[in-house]
Image: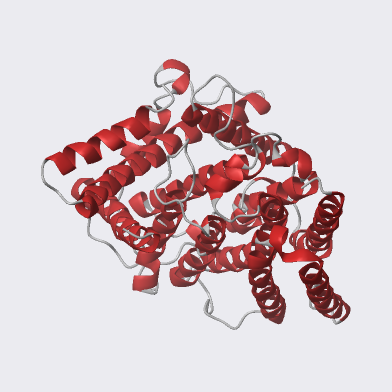
Amino acid sequence: MEHWFTDIAQALVNWLMGLGLSAGWADFVLLIVQWLCIVMIVTINVIILIWLERKVSGFIQLRLGPNRLGPYGAFQTIADAIKLLTKEDIIPSRTDKWIFMTAPLFFIVVSVMLYAVIPMGDGMQVVDFNVGLLYFISIGSLSTICLLMAGWGSNNKWSMLGAMRAVAQMISYEIPLAISLLGVVMIAGSLRLSDIVVAQGNIWFVLLQPIAFITYFIAATAELNRGPFDMPEAEQELTAGAYTEYTGMRWALFFLAEYTNLVAVSALCATMFFGGWQGPGLPSWLWIIIKTYLIMLVFMWMKWTFPRIRMDHLMSFSWKILLPVSLANLVLTGFGLEFFKWMGWW
Amino acid sequence: MSDYATIGVFLLLTMAFPIAAMAASWMFRPKPKSSEDKMLPYECGVDTKGKTWIRFRVSYFLYALVFLAFDVGVVFLFPWAAKFKFLGIYAFAAMLIFISLLLIGLWYAWKEGALEWY
C-alpha cells in the first residue's frame, strides 16, 4: 500500500528504459503521466468538493442539499458539468476581447501549476523544488492578475468593482500569509516542502507555531475569496463580481480554478502545519488526503457560519492586526530559536 | 531534467488543459446568432450608462504602494529564514533592524492615512 504509486512510476521508467529510451526521455514520459494524474486529481476533487460544499451548506442551514441524482445527490455535480459544457459561449460586444477570453484559461493554468510542488505522499512530488515554498507563494499570487483581467476585460461595472476589491484584498492578505509561513521555515531550516514534512517527524508545527497557523488560515481564506471574506463576489450586491459576464465553459473554468486553489492551499496547510503525509498506520498518500479534506471542511464550516465582513474592516484587519501579529510571531520565533541554540537544545 | 526544466515542461502541458476544455465545449455548445441587445453588458436588465474603464479611487493605489514595499521586504526575509540555524546572532540582530525598518514604514503609512479605506 505504502509505495503503490512510487513503485508504478519506477516500473514505468524501468520499462521505458528497457525499450531503449534514454533516462531523460523516460523522465519526460513519466512527467506526462504525472501531469495526467494531477489533472485527474484536480477534476475529481472539484466534482467531490462542489457536492460536499452544497451538502455541508445544506446541513448547516437545516436543508437537504442536492438529493435527486444518485445516492445522496452524488451525481449532481456531473449533471452540472454536462450542462455547463453544452452552454453557449457569450462574449459581449463591448469587452476587451483577448483579455476577457484568456482570463479563465490563465486562472486554471496558474492553479494547476501549484500542484507541481505539493508533496502528495512519501516521494510523490512532481518537482522536489529547493525553493518549493517560494514557488508556491509566487505562483499562487498570480491569480490576482487573472481576476483583474476578468474584471477589467468584461467592461461591466459589477465585474470592475469585484475585481478591484479582489485585488485590494488579495494583495493585502498575501503579506501576512508569506510572513506567517516564514516562522515554519525558520524551524524547519528549508524551503523544500519535503524537508519541511520530514522536520515534523516528532511534533507538528501547528503546536510550535500556533500564531502562525491562525494567521495563515485567516489570510488563506481571504486569498481564496472565500468564507467571511467573499466581498469580491458578494452575490447580493455585485451579482458575481468578476465572473458576471462569463458563461458556459469559461465560467466553469473559473469555478474549477477556485476549487483547485482551495485544495492546493489546504494541502499546503496540511504540509506546513499538520505533518504532511506523515501519520501512523495508513499509507502516506491517504494521510495527506484525509488531512486536506478535514482542513477543507473547516474552510466550509467558516464560510457558512460567519457573516460577510465589511470592506474597510477587512482591509484594516489585514494591515493593522494580521501584519503586526505575524511580524511579532517572526521575531518571537527568532528569539525562541536563539534561546534554544544558546541552551544547546537545537 | 533539472527542476526548472521540469517546471517549464509542466507549464506547457498545463496550458493544454484549458485549451482541451474549451475545444470540448466548442464541440457540444450551441452557436446561435447573436443580437445586439444580447451582447450588451449585464447590469440587471438596465442598459449600461457611462464608461466603465475609468480612473479608480486613489486609496487602491496607496494600498498597492504599501504592498509593493512590504512584498519586496518579505522576499529578503526568505533566504534568512531558511538559513536561520547557521547564521548566528549577528544575522538575527541585522534582521531585527530590518524588521523594525519595515515597522517604521508601516507606522508612517498608517499615520499618513494610507491604510484608511474611505
Viewer-nearest residue: A290 or B95: B95
Is A306 located above or below residue A284 in the figure? below
User: Residue A312 at x, y = what percent?
Assistant: 78, 64
Please indicate whether residue B7 sits to the left or right of residue A211 in the image.
left
Is A227 located above or below residue A247 in the figure? above
Where, by quadrant of the figure, is residue A83 drawn? top left
Q: Residue furthest left?
A: A19
Where, by quadrant of the figure, is residue A24 drawn? bottom left
User: Residue B71 at x, y = what percent?
Assistant: 65, 72
Where the C terminus of chain B falls, by quadrant?
bottom right
Examine the rendering and report whether any part of residue B39 can be seen: no
Residue at 25% across, 52% down: A28
Please indicate whether residue A73 sits to the left or right of residue B108 in the image.
left
Where, by quadrant of the figure, is residue A303 drawn? top right
Where the N terminus of chain B falls, by quadrant?
bottom left
User: Residue B104 at x, y = what percent?
Assistant: 85, 78
Colouring: secondary structure
Examine the rendering and report whether any part of residue A83 can be seen: yes
Residue at 44% across, 25% down: A2
Please indicate whether residue A60 sits to the left or right of residue A134 in the image.
right
User: Residue A228 at x, y = what percent?
Assistant: 70, 47
Is A97 located above or below residue B22 in the figure? below
